[in-house]
Image (tube, grey):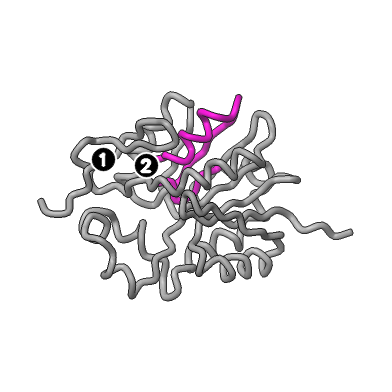
């Protein structure tokens, strides 16, 4: 089939030095998202509780489990195929994977205890999805690509509830684009988070990192 991602043919993708299983129809982890992993690892405390929202294949959670000693990994995706794939990729790390919409399926016991909250949420504007390469447009789930009118709908929802879940000193990290970063920062600030932009020309990657605002 024309445009079929090579990762779907092989059944795996190279990510952060690991082989991540990628089933047909599941979003393929991008190498630029390795920058998100690096930034998350840099702010993670010992034995961190990590939540990976919009986890897709579970690549980010698996990568963080491989570099963080004693981390507890929780992952969520709304797509059943992605959840099944993530279960396999996170099994070795003892990760728990939940099917549902963002925070909804997470155990309530995690509220106020999450050290690292990562989200590679969809951020392609709706009108731009049809312009994407066929390997994405035809073979990856639209729910993993379409971020709404300006691409930030899911990011705004993630940031709106983050403070309910973050532990003191915890961080939210969201992958975005260089052009959209100011809007992502705006969403963080609006919902009571600090925000700074971490960019990597080498990875062609942009991540917004936030935490609780100081009230001093």
Disc 2: which residue: 57
The residue at 46%/47% (across/down) is 33
Does dot 2 land on a helix, a strand or a loop? Answer: loop
Does dot 1 land on a helix, a strand or a loop? Answer: loop
Residue 23 among those drawn in magenta: no
**Quadrant the C terminus occupies:** bottom right
Instruction: Estimate the x, y position of residue 37 in percent, counting from the top left.
Output: 53, 42
Distance CA(mark 1)–CA(mark 2): 8 Å
Outermost residue toward the front in this view? 202
The residue at 60%/54% (across/down) is 198
Instruction: Estimate the x, y position of residue 165 in percent, counting from the top left.
Output: 64, 49
When asked about the image quadrant of residue 195, the answer is: bottom right
Disc 1: which residue: 23
| Horizontal arrangement in the rendering, residue 109 relative to residue 127 (left or right) | right
Instruction: Estimate the x, y position of residue 77 in percent, counting from the top left.
Output: 41, 48
Q: Are marks 1 and 2 in contact (CB under 8 Å)?
A: yes
State which region is magenta: 51-76
| Horizontal arrangement in the rendering, residue 27 relative to residue 120 (left or right) | left
The residue at 43%/63% (across/down) is 123
Q: Measured along the vertical axis of the image, is residue 41 above or below residue 151?
A: above
Residue 64 among those drawn in magenta: yes
The residue at 57%/31% (across/down) is 72
Outermost residue toward the right in this view? 216
């Amino acid at each position: 089939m024309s445009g079929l991602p090579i990762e779907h043919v092989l059944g795996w993708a190279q990510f952060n030095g690991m082989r991540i299983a990628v089933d047909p129809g599941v979003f393929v982890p991008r190498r630029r998202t390795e920058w998100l992993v690096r930034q998350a690892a840099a702010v993670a405390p010992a034995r961190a509780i990590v939540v990976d929202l919009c986890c897709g294949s579970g690549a980010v959670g698996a990568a963080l489990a491989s570099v963080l000693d004693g981390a507890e990994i929780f992952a969520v995706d709304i797509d059943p195929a992605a959840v099944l794939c993530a279960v396999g990729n996170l099994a070795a790390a003892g990760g728990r994977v939940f099917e549902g919409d963002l925070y909804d399926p997470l155990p309530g016991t995690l509220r106020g205890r999450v050290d690292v909250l990562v989200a590679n949420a969809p951020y392609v504007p709706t009108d731009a999805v049809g312009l994407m390469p066929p390997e994405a447009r035809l073979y990856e789930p639209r729910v993993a690509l379409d971020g709404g009118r300006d691409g930030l709908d899911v990011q705004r929802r993630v940031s709106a509830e983050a403070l309910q879940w973050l532990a003191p000193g915890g961080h939210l990290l969201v992958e975005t684009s260089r052009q959209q970063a100011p809007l992502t920062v705006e969403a963080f600030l609006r919902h009571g988070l600090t925000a700074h932009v971490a960019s990597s020309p080498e990875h062609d990657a942009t991540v917004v990192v936030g935490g609780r605002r100081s009230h001093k």
